[in-house]
Image (cartoon, rainbow, N blue to C red):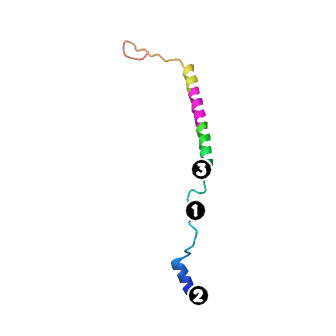
Amino acid sequence: MMNEVFKFAAYGDKHAPPPPRPYSIFDKNDIEQRTAKLREEVEVLKASLAELKAARQQDRPDVVMTFGDDGIIA
């Protein structure tokens, strides 16, 4: 009996199935779909940010600074 225990401890199970691949829990198609959706959302956000910046620029008048004879901004 102990001989069998030592033999199994030394050699183990020779016919054990190989371990699963590390990334086998992920579905590549699902990840690609989610990535595409997120990229579209990022593009929409970038476009709305550009619109906001343009609207702010139009609302703000240009600031004109003039220097007096003494070099101080008037």
Q: What element carries label 3?
A: helix
* Circle 3 or circle 2, nearest the eye: 3
Examine the rendered structure and indicate whether residue 43 appears above or below residue 18.
Answer: above
Q: Which mark is residue 29?
A: none
Q: Where does residue 50 sit, x and y in percent of width and height?
A: 56, 28
Determine the CA span between mark 3 and mark 1: 16 Å
Report which residue position mark 3 lands on: 28
Quadrant into which the N terminus falls: bottom right
Against 41, is 70 above or below?
Answer: above
Main secondary structure of the magenta stretch: helix
Q: Is mark 1 on a helix, strand or loop?
A: loop
On screen, residue 40 above or below 68:
below
Kindly report the distance in space between the C-alpha atoms of the residues bearing marks 2 and 1: 33 Å
**Residue drawn at x 53%, y 83% as measured from the top left:** 6
Q: Earlier in the sequence, mark 3 or mark 2?
A: 2
Q: Where's residue 56, x and y in %?
A: 56, 23
Which residue in the structure is indicated by mark 1? Answer: 20
The magenta-colored residue range is 41-52
Q: State the image coordinates of residue 61 (x, y, percent, origin top left).
A: 53, 17
Q: Disc 1 marks which amino acid?
A: Pro
Q: Mark 2 points at which residue?
A: 1
Tell me the kind of residue under disc 3: Lys
Q: Position of residue 10 (x, y in %)?
A: 51, 79
Residue shown at 60% from the left, 33% from the top? 44
Does the CB distance between marks 2 and 1 fall below 8 Å? no
Q: Which residue is drawn at 58% across and 30% down?
A: 47
Q: Which of 2 and 27 is in front in this view?
A: 27
Q: Where, by quadrant of the figure, is residue 12 drawn?
A: bottom right
Q: Is residue 48 magenta?
A: yes
- 58 vs 71, nearest the viewer: 58
Image quarter where the C terminus lies is: top left
Identify the mark nearer the N-term, 2 or 1: 2
